[in-house]
């Protein structure tokens, strides 16, 4: 039965990943904007096809949303390409947790006892963060787990959050927003420790289009409701990993974002706000972190400079 369940989900997700990759109608597109982003991707040396090991040959997924006009302007390169998001998909989990809190199903300060095998972390994702690693038997609050999951990208916290939220609930909310294909299918642990029905399912994937649209709804205070949007924006603004797209931004810019990295994949998605320059940037790469960091910096810098030039004329 569990194999049938996993196969059914796989077929459903595969179908909707194709059917729901259309750009929403509230965005406008301009060839000149997309052409500029294509040039930036080329200049940053990110326009290749890369060997992602067991995931095969892969390309980046990249999107930018210009927030300064009357209507949002979207462009990108392979923005509808589904790719492994690593820890970026923790933001989808956070959305559902905050939705349930908003619905008064429980409080942010509800106590939760950590149980194995969820306590997977042996080292901190951010070495200088003083908070101890979670371990079996620890009693913490939902709020504490939420903060750990987003700001430190803690995998143990994410596993606990996925259990609290429930994957079925997370994905129903994803579908309400049209993000078919980006379902949360896995926890951050070995398949042999997964719940029945999720031990053979495909890995979680997402696209730059879906991730950027997620950030746009936060920016508009429309992700579930204004309270959920603002709570999540505060968490994203406290992101401790500043080694990816952040390094291409000036110190005056506020970046509300979520990063992710694992094996061949290095990603960053967020809202850039620097006075009159406001945009969303989503970049997923099938390239190892150490190799891609300089290229992410270059791409981020060039996108910011493009936006700066664009609005200096007005």
Image: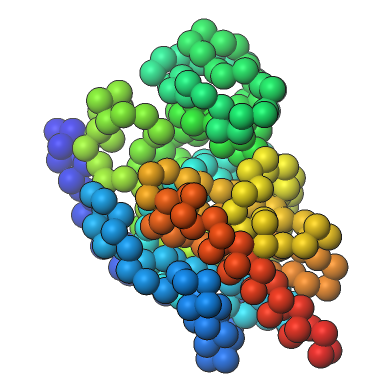
| Residue ID at (66%, 48%) | 242
Q: Position of residue 113 (x, y in %)?
A: 54, 13
Quarter of the image where one finds residue 37: bottom right
Foreground residue, 25 or 159?
159
Q: Which is more toward the observer, 125 or 258?
A: 125
Q: Quadrant of the N terminus?
A: top left
Residue 266 as seen in the image, left or right of residue 180: right
Q: Nearer the viewer, residue 181 or 302?
A: 302
Q: Is residue 46 left or right of residue 257?
A: left
**Residue 207 seen:** yes
Above or below residue 218? Residue 197 is above
Q: Is residue 99 visible?
A: no
Q: How is the image coloured?
A: rainbow
Q: Residue at x 48, y 50 (%)?
A: 289
Picture mark count: 0
- Is residue 49 or residue 223 the one in the foreground? 49
Measured along the vertical axis of the image, is residue 160 above or below residue 241?
A: above
Residue at 18 percent across and 46 percent down: it is: 7
Residue depicted at 44% across the width and 59% down the height: 285
Q: Is residue 164 above or below residue 136?
A: below
Quadrant of the image containing the C terminus: bottom right
Where residue 215 appears, as percent x and y from the top left, is 61, 59
Residue 103 location, x and y as percent? 63, 38
Q: Which image quarter: residue 194?
A: top left
Report the side of 238 relative to 28 (left or right).
Answer: right
Residue furthest out toward the top: 137
Rendered location of residue 286, percent (x, y): 39, 57
Relative side of 214 to 108, left or right: left
Q: Is residue 303 above or below residue 12?
A: below
């Amino acid at each position: 039965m569990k194999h049938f369940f996993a196969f059914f989900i796989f077929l459903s997700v595969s179908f909707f990943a194709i059917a729901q990759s259309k750009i929403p109608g509230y965005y406008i597109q301009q060839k000149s904007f997309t052409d500029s982003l294509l040039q930036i991707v080329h200049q940053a040396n990110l326009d290749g096809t890369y060997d992602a090991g067991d995931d095969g040959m892969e390309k980046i997924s990249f999107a930018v949303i210009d927030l300064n006009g009357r209507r949002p302007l979207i462009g990108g390169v392979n923005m509808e390409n589904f790719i492994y998001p690593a820890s970026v998909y923790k933001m989808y989990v956070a959305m559902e947790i905050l939705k349930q809190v908003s619905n008064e199903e429980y409080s942010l300060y509800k106590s939760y006892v950590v149980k194995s095998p969820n306590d997977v972390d042996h080292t901190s994702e951010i070495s200088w963060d003083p908070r101890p690693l979670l371990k079996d038997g620890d009693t913490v609050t939902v709020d504490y787990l939420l903060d750990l999951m987003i700001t430190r990208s803690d995998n143990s916290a994410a596993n606990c959050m996925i259990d609290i939220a429930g994957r079925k609930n997370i994905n129903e909310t994803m579908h309400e927003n049209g993000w078919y294909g980006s379902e949360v299918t896995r926890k951050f642990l070995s398949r042999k420790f997964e719940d029945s029905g999720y031990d053979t399912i495909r890995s979680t994937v997402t696209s730059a289009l879906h991730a950027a649209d997620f950030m746009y709804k936060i920016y508009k205070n429309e992700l579930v409701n204004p309270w959920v949007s603002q709570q999540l924006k505060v968490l994203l603004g406290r992101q401790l990993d500043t080694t990816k797209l952040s390094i291409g931004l000036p110190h005056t810019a506020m970046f509300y974002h979520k990063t992710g990295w694992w094996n061949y994949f290095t990603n960053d998605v967020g809202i850039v706000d620097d006075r009159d320059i406001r945009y969303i940037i989503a970049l997923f790469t099938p390239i190892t972190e150490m190799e891609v960091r300089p290229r992410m910096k270059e791409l981020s810098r060039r996108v910011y400079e493009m936006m700066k030039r664009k609005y200096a004329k007005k």
